Structure formats: structure tokens, C-alpha cells
Image (cartoon, rainbow, N blue to C red):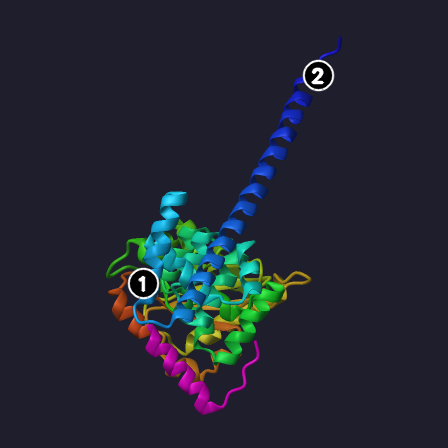
């Protein structure tokens, strides 16, 4: 009687495990999808009951009544707080078609966090980014708390442009640079305080590369530091070179300690043109430059018309101010940017 070879036996058992593991994933997804639908239906029914009665204070009474009854019948998970979440879920997404799309891709915990966002465009941004980058619920929470939307370039665009960008992301999973690049970048994880050099900043980034990529975005892939390029027998060095998978382009990063200066544009243009000539592969898009500095100097950026080029300028913060102060600053920056666009009558194309 012949015996199964050890290697064949191992592969056989791995196949069995894969079958079971895949089934577990399908079952978990199916269960989550049904749970989300039940929660939406409960919220829908409660909302209709509240609207039918039209009595002051009736909403809280019916929520209390439902909570007590369901807890007695089904156990934990049906407390007043959760019933409020179900009601909020329905009020936020009254369209069952939207709910059907959400429940197959996001968990209930994702959805519960998203319903706390009142701004529709901001919420849609997080929904689509969550789906495309497959964020865990913890990552989603961290992105919301770090004010990712307010820091992303798209938030400073006119409302119609934001809608088009998000719709493109939803339908074709196509990211644009405005959905990728931020301002400012939070580099507080580097542990740097006052009086550090550009080399110390670069060393700290490379030492904490994983955290830096998390802050930049999951599609960034590190290629090189101090990338040497030679032009007319002169050597230049690009501080950091990355590749962005979805944008399909190289991203050159120049680190500056002080405020943005006009000369930085020419320097970055030189780097980008060299990369486009010598490092570009078929099917790739033109390189993008990111200048990180301690002061953006918006008038310089405007006059140099960097918004029409492949060069981005952003502040970085190694020490974060209180959240309220930072959020106020970001909201003012968004309002100023949109006011400028309105005055200029600028037509933007995603």
C-alpha cells in the first residue's frame, strides 16, 4: 500500500484549510450584511412610528419601550444607546439602495462611526476611502480624529468638484492627486522638537518609515533616500523618492526646515523633469513633487501658480497644537481657499 508523500500531504491539508477559511469569511460577511440590514429596518420602523404619532417626547418613550422589550426577548445589544444608533443609521441613509451597497463592504462598526459625520461630502469621502483602502474600524476612527478630510487637498475645492472626485472614486476607484496629498502633514511621531537639522528630519522619517507611510497614505511605496541624479556633470540629491501605486507615478519629496521660498520651485522642476526623462516607464504618469516645509507662504504659492503644476507644497508639524486650534485653522484655510476660487472664477477639472 503506497503512502502519500509528506509534501503532497502538506499541500492537501493546506487546500482543506483554505476551503474552510474562505467559507468562514463568506459566512462572516453574510452575517454582517444581514445584521446591518436588520438594524436599518429597526431604525426605519421606529422613525415611521415617531412620525405617525407627532407627539412631543414620544420619540424617547418609544425608544425606551423598544429597548426594554427587545432586551428581554433577545438579550444584550438592544439598549437605548444602540436603538438611537439604529435610528440615526436610517436617518443618515434613508435610501435602501445605498444601504445595500454599504452592508456588503463595511461592518456595522464602520457604519456607526460614519453616521456621526453630519457633512455629506465629508462622510462620502470617508466611505469611499474606507472601501478603497480597506480600513479597519480602528484606522477609520484614527483618520477621522486626525482630520484627514480637512487636511486633504480636495476639501479646499468647490463643492461640485468634490462631488465629481468622490463619484469617480466610487465608480472607478480612481484616485486623483487632490485625494492623495494633504496639508499639513502630522509628523509628531518622529519625536523631534526644536533645533533639528534637515538630515535629522530625514533620518527620523526613515527610522519611522512605516508610520510615515501611514501618514502619507497606504499606496505610497518607498524607493530611495538621497537619490543621486547627475545633470551637466553636477550631482543633485532628491531627499526621498516614493512611488504611488494608484496614481502610477513617482513622488519626489524635498524636505525644508524653514518657510517656502520661490527658488524651491525651480529645484523641484529640475528633479521632476529629470525623473520624467530617465526614470519613467511605459504606462506611468508624470512624476509629482512634494515640498514639505515649516511655512507654506500661500502668496508665494499662488503667484508661482503651483496649483497648475505637478508640484505640491505643504506644511509639516512635528508638535501638534490642541485639536480645537488645529481644526479652526484648517476650517479657515478651507474657507479662504474656496473664497479665492470663487473670486477668480476658476474652472477646475479633476
Q: Is residue 62 left or right of residue 166?
A: left
Q: Which mark is residue 4?
A: 2
Q: In this view, does 266 lie above or below 198?
A: below
- Is-magenta flag for residue 29? no
- 131 or 259: nearer the viewer: 131
As measured in the structure, the alpha-carbon distance from the residue carrying label 2 to the one carrying label 1 is 67 Å
- Which is in the foreground here, disc 2 or disc 1? 1
- 75 or 114: nearer the viewer: 75
Where does the C terminus fall, quadrant-wise? Answer: bottom right
Q: Residue at x 26, y 68 (%)?
A: 324
Where's residue 249, x and y in %?
58, 63
What segment is highlighted magenta in the picture?
330-350
Residue 198 can be seen in this image: no
Where does the N terminus fall, quadrant-wise? Answer: top right
Q: Residue at x 45, y 55 (%)?
A: 110
Q: In this view, does 151 lie to the left or right of 162?
A: left
Residue under circle 1?
A: 60
Q: Which of marks 2 and 1 is nearer the N terminus?
A: 2
- 202 or 267: nearer the viewer: 202
- Is-magenta flag for residue 343? yes
Q: In this view, does 245 lie above or below 335?
A: above
Where's residue 13, x and y in %?
63, 25
Q: Is residue 209 above or below residue 232?
A: above
Element type at mark 1:
helix
Neighbours of disc 1 within 10 Å: few (<14), some (14-19), many (20+) = few
| Main secondary structure along the magenta-highlighted residues | helix
Where's residue 44, x and y in %?
47, 63
Q: Residue at x 45, y 51 (%)?
A: 136
Numbered-mark total: 2
Q: Residue at x 28, y 59 (%)?
A: 196
Q: In this view, does 273 lie to the left or right of 236?
A: right
Element type at mark 2:
loop
Amino acid at each position: 500500500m503506497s503512502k502519500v508523500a509528506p509534501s503532497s500531504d502538506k499541500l492537501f491539508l493546506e487546500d482543506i484549510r483554505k476551503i474552510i477559511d474562505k467559507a468562514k469569511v463568506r459566512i462572516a460577511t453574510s452575517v454582517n450584511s444581514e445584521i446591518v440590514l436588520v438594524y436599518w429596518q429597526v431604525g426605519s420602523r421606529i422613525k415611521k412610528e415617531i412620525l405617525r404619532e407627532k407627539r412631543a417626547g414620544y420619540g424617547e418613550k418609544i425608544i425606551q419601550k423598544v429597548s426594554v422589550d427587545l432586551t428581554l426577548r433577545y438579550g444584550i445589544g438592544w439598549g437605548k444607546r444602540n436603538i438611537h444608533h439604529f435610528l440615526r443609521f436610517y436617518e443618515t441613509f434613508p435610501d435602501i439602495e445605498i444601504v445595500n451597497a454599504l452592508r456588503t463592504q463595511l461592518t456595522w462598526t464602520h457604519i456607526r462611526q460614519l453616521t456621526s459625520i453630519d457633512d455629506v461630502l465629508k462622510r462620502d469621502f470617508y466611505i469611499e476611502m474606507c472601501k478603497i483602502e480597506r480600513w479597519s474600524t480602528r484606522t477609520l476612527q484614527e483618520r477621522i480624529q486626525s482630520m484627514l478630510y480637512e487636511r486633504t487637498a480636495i476639501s479646499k475645492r468647490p463643492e461640485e468638484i468634490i462631488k465629481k472626485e468622490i463619484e469617480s472614486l466610487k465608480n472607478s476607484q480612481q484616485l486623483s492627486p487632490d485625494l492623495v496629498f494633504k496639508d499639513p502633514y502630522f509628523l509628531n511621531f518622529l519625536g523631534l522638537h526644536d533645533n533639528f537639522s534637515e538630515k535629522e528630519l530625514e533620518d527620523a522619517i526613515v527610522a519611522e518609515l512605516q508610520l510615515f507611510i501611514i501618514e502619507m497614505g497606504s499606496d505610497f511605496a518607498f524607493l530611495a533616500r538621497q537619490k543621486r541624479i547627475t545633470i551637466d556633470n553636477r550631482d543633485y540629491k532628491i531627499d526621498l523618492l516614493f512611488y504611488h501605486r494608484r496614481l502610477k507615478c513617482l513622488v519626489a519629496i524635498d524636505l525644508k526646515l524653514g518657510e517656502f521660498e520661490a527658488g524651491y520651485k525651480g529645484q523641484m522642476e529640475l528633479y521632476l523633469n529629470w525623473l520624467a526623462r530617465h526614470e519613467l516607464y511605459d504606462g506611468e504618469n508624470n512624476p509629482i513633487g512634494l515640498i514639505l516645509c515649516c511655512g507654506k507662504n500661500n502668496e508665494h504659492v499662488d503667484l508661482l501658480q503651483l496649483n497648475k503644476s505637478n508640484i505640491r507644497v505643504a506644511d509639516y508639524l512635528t508638535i501638534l497644537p490642541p485639536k480645537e486650534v488645529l481644526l479652526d485653522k484648517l476650517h479657515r484655510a478651507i474657507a479662504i481657499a474656496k473664497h479665492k476660487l470663487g473670486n477668480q472664477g476658476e474652472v477646475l477639472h479633476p
